Image (spheres, rainbow, N blue to C red):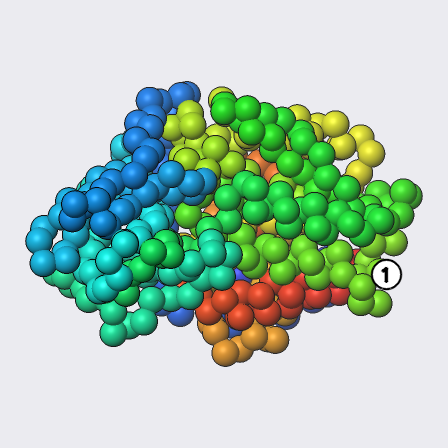
Amino acid sequence: MGKRYLGMAMALVAIVLGSCKNAEKAAAEARETAPSGYQGQGRNAVVPTVDRPVQRQWKGIWAFNDSTTFFTNDFDGGRLNGVAYDGDDHYTVWITAENTPINVSPWYAFKVWTTAPGEITIRLSYQNSRSRYYPKISTDGVAFKPLDSLQFKVINPGEGEFGIKAAPEFAEITLQVSETPTIVAAQELYPSTRVKSWVDSLSQKPFVTNYPIGRTKENRPIHLMEVKENGDAKKALMVIARQHPPEVTGFLAMKSFIETLAGDSDQAREFRKEHTLFVVPLMNPDGVDNGHWRHNMGGIDLNRDWQNFNQPETRSVRDFLRTKDADYDFVFGVDFHSTWDDIYYPLDTVVAGPKGKIVYDWIHAISARLPQKKTNISASVELEPTMVSRTYFFVNHNMPAIVFELGDDTPRDFLKLKGQVAAEELMRLLMAE
């Protein structure tokens, strides 16, 4: 959305909110958080969501140099479609998608080790994509750090100013390898087992439970976490994350967000007296564990299936919400994602009306507390087709909702802080209603 259009939209907000004394102030505050560069992805295209074929990657070990150097993708979240030895300790790896057409989110994750310790160079090569994700490395699969910039080289730099057009065609990384496998990944690894460990850990609190609400095509459970301290609390929030497998930064912000809402602060305790929280932290466990770029095992972008519900993951959340509608008033919904930079995708108050005002109050409150990083806004004025989670939540369950996107390279300590601040400001606003 351009600044001129946003200004027109905010003028209409005052009309829509008519009787609301703070309408003028809300419009001014929303203008303050107008886009500052990154404009988002534009209007979502309507696409079919019936199953499409998925190419399963071969899983195993590649051996080179008389079986002294090895690569593997044989672990949850692994993605490596081919390796070639080019000579002089140089290797080329190929990364291909589960199917096409697909968003340019070239996820990769592999392990490399050798019985002859030394330095090797690896070129990352992609199918119909460019080098989007800066490599992270780990030896235990838990603690990851970005590759040292001196070990990273771009090949054929991009010619654009932002996004995929600015990304290089290839990247080369230099590693010191040994008998201990080094994991190289596009982002930190959070496969379904690790996510479930976090869910189980939080569920040690007496007011947190978790249970499956459905099954994926590969029969993985779709776990829901319920934070309910007061059985009489009839206001509810719905939070989901990781519809798209590579979007780890969104998951990390969501993790901090939920930990704050379920925390031990006086604010959180007061909040839970009136509010119940429902969370699906991993919407696409099949896609995550299979190392997909974007889709589930039906070959579909789940965040285009909130109209027809052809996929088991979206159906599971839809059916769950239907069972709760009679008992709860859903007052807020958040869907955490990742993209090129931090950005909010709310519904414009022109279509959401007074019900949607709290979303903009929330955006402004977060921005006021975290002025060090400007967050972009791209609002939608479309309510049909519902198609994406945010719109479905609002149209079908009357809850103000937002797609909350975090940048691929947003610093991890800031992700944690932003999740915490977002939770604190949302609690404050909801308790003031």
**Front one among 358 and 373:** 373
Residue drawn where x is 42% and y is 59% of the image: 138
Whether residue 16 is visible here, answered yes or no, is no
> Quick one: quadrant of the N terminus?
bottom left
**Badge 1: few (under 14), some or many (20 or more) residues near its Cα, within 10 Å?**
few
Residue drawn where x is 78% and y is 50% of the image: 204
Total residue callouts: 1
x, y percent for residue 213: 67, 29
Vertical arrangement, residue 261 with respect to residue 391, above or below: below
Residue drawn where x is 76% and y is 61% of the image: 263
**Front one among 223 and 49:** 223
Vertical arrangement, residue 96 with respect to residue 49, above or below: below
Q: Is residue 56 left or right of residue 344?
A: left
Whether residue 356 is visible here, answered yes or no, is yes
Task: Name the residue at the bottom extreme.
Answer: 372
Vertical arrangement, residue 52 with respect to residue 373, above or below: above
> Quick one: quadrant of the C terminus?
bottom right
Task: Name the residue at the left extreme.
Answer: 87
Q: Is residue 14 left or right of residue 114?
A: right
x, y percent for residue 194: 57, 47
Tag 1: residue type? Answer: Glu
x, y percent for residue 86: 9, 51
Place residue 133 in its image quadrant. bottom left
Residue drawn where x is 20% and y is 56% of the image: 122
| Label 1 secondary element | helix
Q: Which residue is mark 1?
A: 270
Place residue 292 in its image quadrant. top left
x, y percent for residue 18: 68, 57
